[in-house]
Image (cartoon, coloured by chain):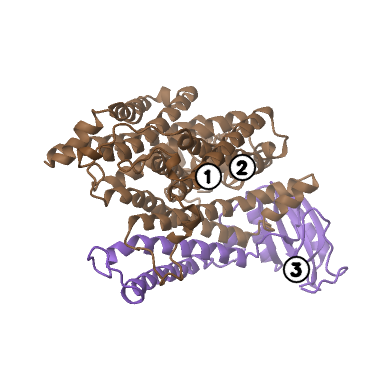
Chain colours: A brown, B purple
Amino acid sequence: MSLLKYESTLREPLVDGEKTYHQVTEDICRPVEEKANTGWKIGFTISVALLLFGVYSVYREVTYGIGQWNLNKTIGWGWDITNFVWWVGIGHAGTLISAILLLFRQGWRTGVNRAAEAMTIFAVMCAGQFPIFHMGRVWDAFFVLPYANSRGPLWVNFASPLLWDVFAISTYFTVSLLFWYSGLIPDFATIRDRAKTKARKLWYGVVSFGWTGSTKHWQRHESLSLVLAGLSTPLVLSVHTIVSFDFATSVVPGWHTTIFPPYFVAGAIFSGFAMVQTLMLVTRKVMKLDDYITLGHIEAMNKVIVLTGSIVGIAYLTELFMAWYGGSKFEFDAFYKYRIAGPYGWSYWTMMTCNVISPQLFWSKKLRRNVAFTFIMSIVVNIGMWFERFVIIVTSVYRDYIPSSWSVYYRPTIWEVGFYLGTFGLFFTCYFLFSKFAPVIAIAEIKHVLKTSGESFKEKMDVIEKESVEHFAHEHAHAH
Amino acid sequence: MGQVKKYVVGCFDDENVLFPAVKKVRAAGYKIQDVYTPMPVHGLDHALGMRETSLHTAGFIYGITGTTTALTCMSWIFTSDWPLNIGGKPHLPLPAFIPITFELTVLFAAVGMVLTFCYLCQLAPFVKKHHFHERATDDLMVMVIECTAKTNEEEVKAMLNSNGAVEVNVQEAPVGWWLGRYDRPSKLFKTREVAY
């Protein structure tokens, strides 16, 4: 059996080219050890500028109040909550890749998991800003936490989905951070042991926690990763389920539907994978990591996009069907008069085109493996998924039960847009820093799969695969 | 701590060479202190005769603690500390407690396990340990054999060499860890008395 330790050549290699362990270290550590290139500096500057604009927009909102935004009594949730759900959704792909694909033993996750987990953490950080600042009096934000206070103690309402969100998002952030960081420790140690400068030795010495690579430590590390993956899997499903409860447990037509949890989770994974593609396609190009993030990886992620996009499409159609079949006038109107038609009809059709129709092109293998097309598609999907949240939130509330409360049209102010742009600034500032100071690919995990799934090692399987079945059976029947 | 021991260090660059070597060294009766590898090598823990880790059991206990904490706290608050009338709904709405109970279960298990992991492996910022080879986190699997009074170093070295080690040397190293920085040269405990 010992001959069968390589993966079949029928499967695409996970690492291209002739690589040794040392070569893997060199390739992945290079961007960290080299000086930042011009592209990085320009990107980082733009991100920080966006972040500062966002900080100013938030400053306006905190100082002068929610009136800085164009929300009104009828449309109480607008861009803010749309952006919140959008960012949380984006985070989901990272956990799906790092946790669910680990449990499913999908080898290709190793190339992209580190960056995807980082994306999760940064996306959740961005998401959290919106409900916090939407509170208005942000200095009282800690009131959402259950603590023994001097007001009674008056506790929070544990039966409210908004409070479940507080627990879900904060747990999700903490667990994702721990999962990500525990994986980073051995890789930081690799950089520490290669460090030439004093500053790098100090910094990576501190963040690698004195990791040595002891066999016992690896054994515990593997156990930890597996259990954290097992915990993160239901966790990630619960997070967007709970986010969907914010809407589904209300009695607003268009929100009050039981398909929301699976529909939101599928949409989250859909948009998250699109964001992973956007980031990965740039990262592999700029950092010259195409041997580790191969066309095979991109194709695999595109398959997830077409699957989840179709699930989302079915959810849209189910909603429409139920609105008609349910026989409720308010439901029917919400979908057929205010959503598909009406002043916001354009946003509904943008969502439909971007999320349901265009991803169907990924059924073609040629397009799935086309980098430029994938990149454009990843942006299209993210636009579509932003509009999905906008459609769900705004078009369900803009025509209230009483026509006198109808809100004709909702336009965000510059500070509302600025807040959103600011979270892009935060996200990309964090991502740029991460890609400069941490290995964007999990070095140890790549080394772990290198000898079974690396291109140069799989060739050794050819000899065995060329044998006839009879010959192979005869040779190896008593081999072990 | 502060104790310094002598080790024979053999470096391997291929798992397929390492495994038979581990077997032979153990069969010859030498004590392998540890094998340092750049990535998890499956089966090496068993080859070294280590038992399975119980970290996941600890994780289970932490998880149960989280479940209990969430359920008892919420029930106590809603039924006894401050019973609040929320739309005439029951004071103990168990289904509505499920989400938070689940989240706290996961939170307690994850945080507890990571802290336990760090404690067991003695990992923390500013912790410094002796590294037998700087390429142990790059491409070498470093086998460290502890020398006792009876150990014949030359014999061990010869044995490692004949079993495919690419580099063999003898090192003196302090046991355990100490607080320190990696940008400063490390001093052994016998030359520097530290009282912690």
Question: Disc 1 sits on a residue from what chain?
Answer: A
* Earlier residue among tags 1 and 2: 1
Q: Residue at x 57, y 38 (%)?
A: A51
Residue under label 1: A122
Q: Distance from label 3 to label 2 (Cα)?
A: 34 Å
- Look at the picture and state if B75 lies above or below A112: below
Numbered disc 3: secondary structure: loop
User: Where does the image place residue B102, in percent across and percent down from the top left?
Assistant: 38, 62
Q: Residue at x 37, y 53 (%)?
A: A238
Question: Disc 3 sits on a residue from what chain?
Answer: B
Q: Amino acid at mark 3?
A: Val
Is residue A328 left or right of A175 when viewed as pictured? left
- Say which quadrant the C terminus of chain B sits in: bottom right
Is residue A299 left or right of A247 when viewed as pictured? right
- Look at the picture and state if B62 lies above or below A208: below
- Look at the picture and state if A141 lies above or below A320: below
Q: Residues within 10 Å of mark 3 (few under 14, many from 20)?
A: some
Q: Quadrant of residue A335?
A: top left
Closer to viewer: mark 1 or mark 3: 1
Nearest the viewer among A131 and A389 is A131
Q: Quadrant of residue A438?
A: top right
Q: Residues within 10 Å of mark 2 (few under 14, many from 20)?
A: some
Closer to viewer: mark 3 or mark 2: 2
Residue under label 3: B175
Is residue A165 left or right of B28 when viewed as pictured? left
Q: Both on one chain, marks 1 and 3?
A: no
User: Where does the image place residue A341, in percent across and percent down from the top left?
Assistant: 23, 28
User: Where does the image place residue B96, in percent across and percent down from the top left?
Assistant: 30, 62
Q: Distance from label 1 to label 3 (Cα)?
A: 39 Å
Numbered disc 2: secondary structure: helix
Say if mark 1 contacts mark 2, CB within 8 Å.
Answer: yes
Q: Amino acid at mark 2?
A: Phe
